[in-house]
Amino acid sequence: MGSSRSAVLALLSLLAIRAGFNPCLAAEQPPAARPNLLFVLCDDLRPAALGCYGSPHVRTPQIDRLASEGILFRNAFCTTSLCSPSRASILSGLYAHAHGVTNNFTEYPAAMTSFPGRLHDAGYATAYFGKYHMGEENDGPRPGFDRFVTHKGQGKYFDTEWNFHGEKREVVPGYYTTVVTDMAVQWLEEQKDSPRPWCLLLGHKAPHSFYTPEPKYAHAFDGVRVAYPESAFKLEDKPGWIRERLTTWHGIYGPLFEWRKQFPDPRPEAVVDFENMVHGYWGTILSVDDSLGRLRAWLEKTGQLERTILVFMGDNGLLEGEHGMVDKRTAHEASLRIPLIVRAPGLPAGRTIAQQVLTVDTAPSLLELCGAAPLSGIHGRSWVRLATEGDPSWRTSWFYHYNYEKQFPYTPNVRAIRTDDWKYIHYPTGAGGPDKHLAELYDLKNDPGETKNLIADPAQSARIGALGAELARLMAGTGLTPETDKMPLDEGIKAALPDQKIR
């Protein structure tokens, strides 16, 4: 605790030098002495689709620059790979079963504290622009924000109808990423002469399906050939539900978010539809990079860059053909991994953190950086000490869970544990009986692509038992026990497409 406090004091001292006031303890700082916070959240963004995370094709100079000047978290993960539950975990610091947003149709509880709400109470001007996506049909203002501009459901890449803080609904012509950035910059302009610090959350639609690039990027990747990943054809030792998923809405032989018109299509030449889908996905990210450049330019122009915490993050990962799957929800690496980059006064520049950080760590970390009161009773922990000086006590294991959805019946109930080197996944039925599907065990150190399921290897029986016990311990620590872990009944993988309104 003392080291974390020291990191915050160092941050505030640096701010003091640049802003011309005397540093004092974070809890005693007047609001005007605290840093601003610009939080950029992308939807379904794979880290592997960013230059700074190793993409050989997608050029993201603005995001890469942010990483070079801040901290890149190499192993950041979501605790539920689904938009609404993950967003609620980011705001609250809680696992999904605790905040209650376990699907894409549930509101963030109005009475539940969030990190923007806590900053608002601490004197910050707060605003949210873009995709919020908690409460499918609710586009009204939410507690804790002075300005809240969003839309119903997923929104559209072009000409979305926006609700402007309950004052009016209006279709704003243009490309989503550009429009939401315009709104954010306009609000920032209104704050630049205010003595209050500000907290701005910008929620991009991109790169969520249906992937539609800005016209100038529509053909940016035409010359790049994209094949199905090798893991799509190594399913012999995987649970049967993965093979059943191949021809569904979430499989590589299915509609591919309408990039494939005739389906299912397992023909080798049908990979062209997959390639086109990936090209579209990549194209939307180029506009996100442009948006970040515009926001940074505004911070530089107004002299606020060095007193602003800048966070770039994804809400959950995305399967892009791995194991024959698209979408997310599963406990496999591509579904779990998220990008997380933070540039802030007082934090090191150009550092990569290898330890496992989680979505539930976001709220406590940002509140500490802002010198605001912490949230109580949460599951996450602040990574500030880890980022500044190292933290020998940092976690080496954590658990993941997802509940079967009748609206998207392509993924079972999932309960999994990931350590630094191993992953164990099991699939409860939701009826209190034995697992419905074959479990999975992966040696992540030697098999990071999860190509060989070791669950049937007799040599791993002791390890499986130990991982199962650790999983039960971690879950119980958040209130999930065999008596309290209520989950929907797994009704099996189904072929029907989801309702058009919720895709």
Image (cartoon, grey):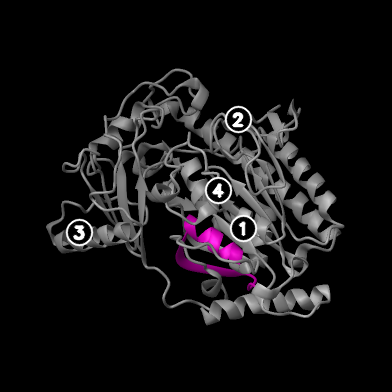
Secondary structure of the residue carrying tag 2 is loop
Secondary structure of the residue carrying tag 3 is helix
Tell us which disc is closer to us: 3 or 2: 2
Residue at image coords 26%, 58%? 472
Query: Which one is in front, 465 or 230?
Result: 465
Q: Is residue 348 magenta?
A: yes
Secondary structure of the residue carrying tag 4 is helix
Residue 324 picture quarter? top left
Disc 1 crowd rating (10 Å Cα; few below 14, some 14-19, many 20+) is some
Look at the image and give the residue range highlighted in magenta. 347-367
Secondary structure of the residue carrying tag 1 is helix
Q: Earlier in the sequence, mark 4 or mark 2?
A: 4
Residue at image coords 79%, 47%? 187
Q: Earlier in the sequence, mark 3 or mark 2?
A: 2
Q: Which residue is mark 1?
A: 118
Q: CA distance from mark 1 to mark 2?
A: 25 Å
Tell us which disc is closer to us: 4 or 1: 1
Q: Which residue is mark 2?
A: 152
Q: CA distance from mark 4 to mark 1?
A: 33 Å
Amino acid type of the residue tagged 4 in the rendering: Ala
Amino acid type of the residue tagged 2 in the rendering: Lys
Disc 4 crowd rating (10 Å Cα; few below 14, some 14-19, many 20+) is many
Q: Image check: 190 left or right of 437?
A: right
The answer to whether mark 3 and mark 2 are in CB contact below 8 A is: no
Tell us which disc is closer to us: 1 or 2: 1
Disc 3 crowd rating (10 Å Cα; few below 14, some 14-19, many 20+) is many
Q: Which residue is mark 3?
A: 464
In the rendered view, would you say 71 is above or below 479? below
Q: Which residue is mark 4?
A: 49
